[in-house]
Image (cartoon, rainbow, N blue to C red):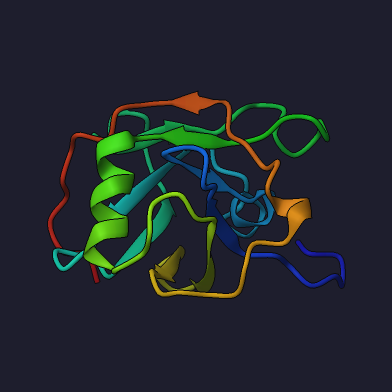
Amino acid sequence: MNSGRVMNLRVTIPAESRRMNVGKDVIRILGSPAYICVLQRKDRKSIAITPCAAEHPMSFKVPDRLLTDGQCRMMINGIQFIQVLLEANGLAAGKDHQFKGQYDAEKMQLSFRLKKMNKVPSRLKSVQLDITSAWSYNTSKWT
């Protein structure tokens, strides 16, 4: 799956937008699913990304060419969702944020604690998604 290289399991929230950029390695480690779900805990201190069916209320289509086209990116737009996540975790709007994921093979999901990390490397600032959505669905607590 990772061909011996270190996987970069991160999501980023760039300062200039209210979107979440999902790294290609996040999709790779999940087995290149057609759809992913972004779930949040009730306390909004962490999120999880997991493969799901297209019918799920929080499903986002993974671009077909994401892993084969170097220019293709995955970006999830959700102004209200991102703003609430930032505020709930004391993270300033207008700053770059990145979150490192922990993979749970048994649950087939990546979990991201929304805490402050180091500044986003400039090479990651251009990561984008091809998906647009208004995140209005609030899921119940996931474990």
Residue at image x 38%, y 60%? 92
Give residue 57's quadrant in the image: top left
Name the side, left or right, on which 60 lies relative to 70.
left
Percent x, y for residue 95? 50, 55
| Residue located 37% across and 45% down the image | 37
Position in image of residue 102 (x %, y %)? 51, 75
Is 31 located above or below residue 102 in the figure? above
Which quadrant of the rendered structure holds the N terminus?
Answer: bottom right
- Using the image as rendered, state which of residue 85 and residue 131 is in the foreground: 85
Residue 129 to residue 83: above or below: above
Q: Which residue is painted at 55% across and 42% down in the image?
A: 33
**Which residue sits furthest right?**
4
Q: In the rendering, at what x and y percent does residue 103 appear?
A: 52, 72
Query: Does residue 65 lie above or below 112 as drawn?
Result: above
Q: Residue at x 52, y 69 (%)?
A: 101
Total marks shown come to 0
Task: Write down the quadrant of residue 7 in the picture.
Answer: bottom right
Left or right position of 140 against 104: left
Left or right of residue 37, residue 11 in this image: right
On-image quarter of the C terminus: bottom left
